Image (cartoon, rainbow, N blue to C red):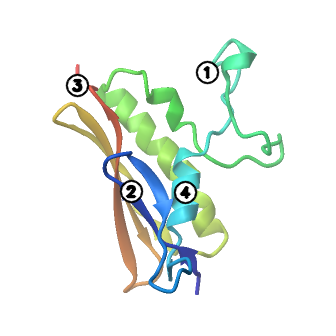
Amino acid sequence: MTTDAVLAIDPEKRVYDIQIDENGDIKTDEWFDTAILYSLFGERRAAPDEVVDAQYRRGWIGNSPDFENGSKMWLFEQARATLSNLNRLQDEAKKALQWLVDDGLAVSIDDPVAEVINNKTFLTITIRRSRDKVARRSYELWENTGRS
C-alpha cells in the first residue's frame, strides 16, 4: 500500500497544491499522484544531440549519469503538434513512468495517449496497480498547439 498527499489543481492559478483536511492535516490517499506528476513534469536533462547548447539542456540538479528521473516532455512544449511529435511525447511519458512498474508500485502502464483537442495538447495515462485498481489521469500540457 502506498500513501500519498492529495494534490488538486487550482483552476485559476493552474498550479497543483497539497490539500488540507478539516483537522489541518495534509489529506492523504492510497495512490501516488505526486510521483506521477514529478515523473512527467520533472525535467530530465536533454542529450547533446537533442539540445546542442549545454546551458539549455535543463534537467534536475540531482540527476547523474547513473540516475535520471523526470521526463523530456519539456522538449515538445514549443514543437508543432504533428503526429510524429505526439507519438514521441507518448513514448517519453511512458519512459518517465516506467520506474513505477520497475519498483513494484504499479503492475503496468498502458500506452499514454497524447492528442490535440481545441488547440490544446492533452496527455492521458492509465496505470494499473492491480487487476481491480486502475487509475486514469489526464493532463492539459499546452495551449495554442493547433495540429499542422
For badge 2, the amino acid type reads Ile
For label 4, the crowd category at 10 Å Cα-Cα, with few meaning under 14, some 14 to 19 and many 20 or more, is many
Q: CA distance from mark 3 to mark 4?
A: 26 Å
Quickly name the residue at label 4: 97
Return the disc, 1 or 4, that comes first in the chain's sequence: 1
Asked whether the beta carbons under mark 1 and mark 4 sit within 8 Å of each other, the answer is: no
Residue 49 position in % (x across, y down): 66, 18
Q: CA distance from mark 4 to mark 2?
A: 20 Å
Quickly name the residue at label 3: 147
Tell me the element at label 3.
Answer: loop
How many numbered marks does the figure carry? 4
Quickly name the residue at label 2: 9
Tell me the element at label 4.
Answer: helix
Q: CA distance from mark 1 to mark 2?
A: 31 Å
Nearest to viewer (mark 4 / mark 2): 2
Mark seen at residue 50: 1
Q: Residue at x 44, y 35 (%)?
A: 88
Mark seen at residue 22: none
Q: CA distance from mark 2 to mark 3?
A: 26 Å
For label 2, the crowd category at 10 Å Cα-Cα, with few meaning under 14, some 14 to 19 and many 20 or more, is few
